[in-house]
Amino acid sequence: MESAQATFTKLENTIGSVNPEGFVSLDVDKLRAIGFSRQKASYVRGVAQGIMAGEIDFEALQSMDDDEARTRLMQIRGIGAWTADTYLLFALRRPDAWPSGDLALVKAIGELRGLPTTPSSEEVDRIADHWKPWRAVAARILWHYYLSERGRIARA
């Protein structure tokens, strides 16, 4: 999270308001200096160009159910299941979004349950199934626990 925030801040400092036009105006060297790998720069450039061409409509996702929005997001090059689920959770504020495979969530659940080894993503997903339809709430609480235990945010 901190690395993504640092990259976003550098991008914002470089182009001002972050928007598709500003992003595509940057060359590969400038994007690398900001913190984008060649592959991530290619993905984000594709998203920016798709938005500018009217091929990607993030506003339309708001009226879709979770499965439809997730499927639509994953049709965009560079967006996988974790990214789609995280978008549903944070941007669309869907109450049951669950970013399967998130390492912080896996570690937090293992620690809170006192498990001797780190649970598998599948095991964590089975645990999270009991929290439906509020898994996004659980994810936020678990992330807060994970970060506060590591001194990366203040404890509540």
Image: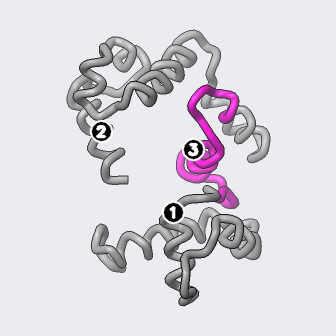
Q: Secondary structure at mark 2?
A: helix
Residue that appears at 75% across and 68% down:
132
The answer for how far apart the CA atoms under marks 2 and 1 are is: 21 Å
Q: Which mark is residue 7?
A: 2
Please state the horizontal and vertical placement of residue 152, each as a whole percent of the image. Answer: 29, 68
The answer for how far apart the CA atoms under marks 1 and 3 are is: 13 Å
Please state the horizontal and vertical placement of residue 54, each as a whole percent of the image. Answer: 61, 13
Q: Is residue 19 above or below residue 91?
A: above
Residue that appears at 25% across and 20% down:
30
Residues packed near mark 1 inside 10 Å, few (<14), some (14 to 19) or many (20 plus):
some
Q: Which mark is residue 103?
A: 1
Which residue has dot 3 on it? 83
Give, as a single range, the part of the protein colored magenta: 73-98
Q: From the image, which quarter does the C terminus lie in?
A: bottom left
Q: Describe residue 151's horizontal placement relative to residue 103 as left or right.
A: left
Q: Which mark is residue 141?
A: none
The quadrant in which residue 147 appears is: bottom left
The quadrant in which residue 64 appears is: top right
Residue that appears at 56% across and 77% down:
109
Q: Is residue 63 magenta?
A: no
Residue that appears at 26% across and 39% down:
9
Q: What amino acid is at disc 2?
A: Thr
The quadrant in which residue 11 appears is: top left
Which of the two residues, 65 or 45, is positioned nearer the viewer here? 45
Q: Is residue 107 visible?
A: yes
Q: Is residue 144 above or below residue 55?
A: below
Which of the two residues, 97 or 125, is positioned nearer the viewer here? 125
Q: What amino acid is at disc 3?
A: Thr
